Structures are given as structure tokens and as C-alpha cells.
Image (cartoon, grey):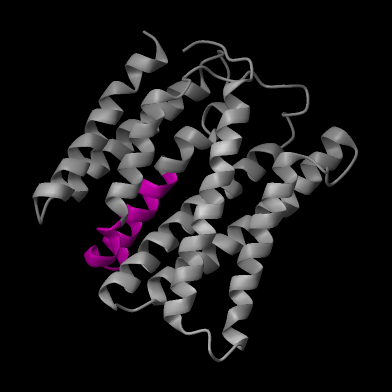
Amino acid sequence: MSFAALYIPVAAAYALALSFFLVRKRGVFWPLLTAFLLQAGYLTLRSLRFGFFNPGGILEESVFLPFCLTGITLWIWRSRSEEDARPLVPAAALFALTYLFLPKGLIPPSAKSPSLFSPLFFFFEILAHALFIAAAVLAGRSLRREETFEPAHRLAVWGFLAYSIAQVTGAIWCYLGWSVPFQWGLRHLHSAAIWCTYVNYLHLRYIPWWTSRRKGWYLVAAALLLLAYLVVLQWGESRQLRIGG
């Protein structure tokens, strides 16, 4: 059975969660939890596709990002507030359903990927992307409903922490694999631009007239920059050699 067929139950569970979000007030998180568990199984199968554990089968942005977004949503649902978690459901579902139209084959591991710093980089980078997107969604809700900005700010801070770890582990991996900690390439420049964008956001607290509402708009704009980067990244990865499908 191809990976395209294996993903159909995952997509169906996400579609059900999105349907519950649109038509029902309650019960949306149970199909989302089902989707999360099914996707965990799908990622496990991907990681074993070559007959050995390959973290690259899990840590691919197009499939791991919605998994992280769903995990963040479920964590907020169980530990904090259903009201804070609910707006994240359509974001997680839409990213997961987008994967239906993307390549399912695996990028084979290269000679530069066995380093532990490679999966650490990808894990923290993709987790940070998910936190930044979740922060933008909650920031947008606070702008629309005049609600508290604090949940969005907290997610952005955690995202910046994860992204900073990704920058360090990525630089080490780059040095081990390519003999330099930074390259003037498309991926590195995009990554640096996003990091600087959120550094700037954290320093807005020192400007008195930057109110929570203005910070909310900033997080939404920063997420649009991130989405542009993800589109470029997906375009680059779609041209790489893949095995299976």
C-alpha cells in the first residue's frame, strides 16, 4: 500500500474535526485527537520505510507541521482553555489536508544527515513554526473579539525559544556537514530573517506606544512572512529526489 493511501484515514479524521468545528459547539477535540493518533502511526510507518529508523521520515515540514499544530491545540485544550484551543482547530486541519496534494515519497538520507544535530534542528524548527502560527491565530482572535492577548504572546515566546535552539543546532550541523556554521543560501537567509523578526517582536515591550493590539497585528504579519518562507521551502523540497509515494 502506498503512503498516499495510508494518509487517507488521517485526512478523513482531520476533515471530520473541521466539520465538527464548523457545525457543532462541542465534541470537536475528539476527532482531532483521533487524527493526531492516526498521524502518529503514519509518521512511525514513514520513519521505518527504509527498513531502519529514519528521523527524516517524521521531520518533514509538510507533514510534521500539522502534527505539531494539533499537539499544541490538544495541549491547550487539556491544560488551559477550550476557548483558547478552539480557534487552532481549523489551522491544524487545513495544514493537514494540504498535505493530501503534496508529494508523499521520502527524501533519502544523505551522508550529512546521520549527525544528531540534524533531527534536533528540524524538530525545533518545525515546532517553532507551529508555535508561531498558533500565536498568530490567537492574536487574530484577540484583534477580532477584543480578548486578552496573553495566550498569543506566550506561544510566540515559546516559539522564539524553540527557534533559537534550532538556530544553534542547525549551525552546529552545518559546520559538521559543510565546514561552515552559516551559508548565504535561500534557506539560511529566510531562517535568519524570521529569527530577527521575532527578536524585534520581543523588544516591542520597551516601546510604550506598542499596545497589545499593535503587537497582535505584528504577530499576524510575522506569520505571513513565515508562510511565504514555507511556500518557498515546499517548492524547493518538491524538486528533490523521493522514494516511494
| Residue 197 against residue 11 in the figure, above or below | below
Q: Is residue 51 magenta?
A: no
Q: Is residue 73 magenta?
A: yes
Q: Position of residue 135 (x, y in %)?
A: 43, 63
Say if 170 sits above or below 178 in the image.
Answer: below
Please name the residue shown 31% across and 36% down the image: 37
Residue 120 position (above or below residue 49): below
Q: Position of residue 206 (x, y in %)?
A: 62, 87
Tell which residue pokes out farthest to the top in this image: 1
Q: Main secondary structure of the magenta part?
A: helix
Q: Quadrant of the N terminus?
A: top left
Q: Is residue 183 left or right of residue 75?
A: right
The boundaries of the magenta stretch are: 68-87
* Residue at (40, 49) in percent of width and height: 69
Q: Is residue 157 left or right of residue 83?
A: right
Q: Nearer the viewer, residue 27 or 96?
A: 96
| x and y percentages locating residue 208 in the rendered image | 56, 91
Could you say which quadrant of the image residue 185 lies in? top right
Q: Is residue 40 above or below residue 1?
A: below
- Comparing 113 with 22, the one in front is 22
Query: Whole-percent x and y of residue 41?
Result: 37, 28
Does the image show residue 128?
no
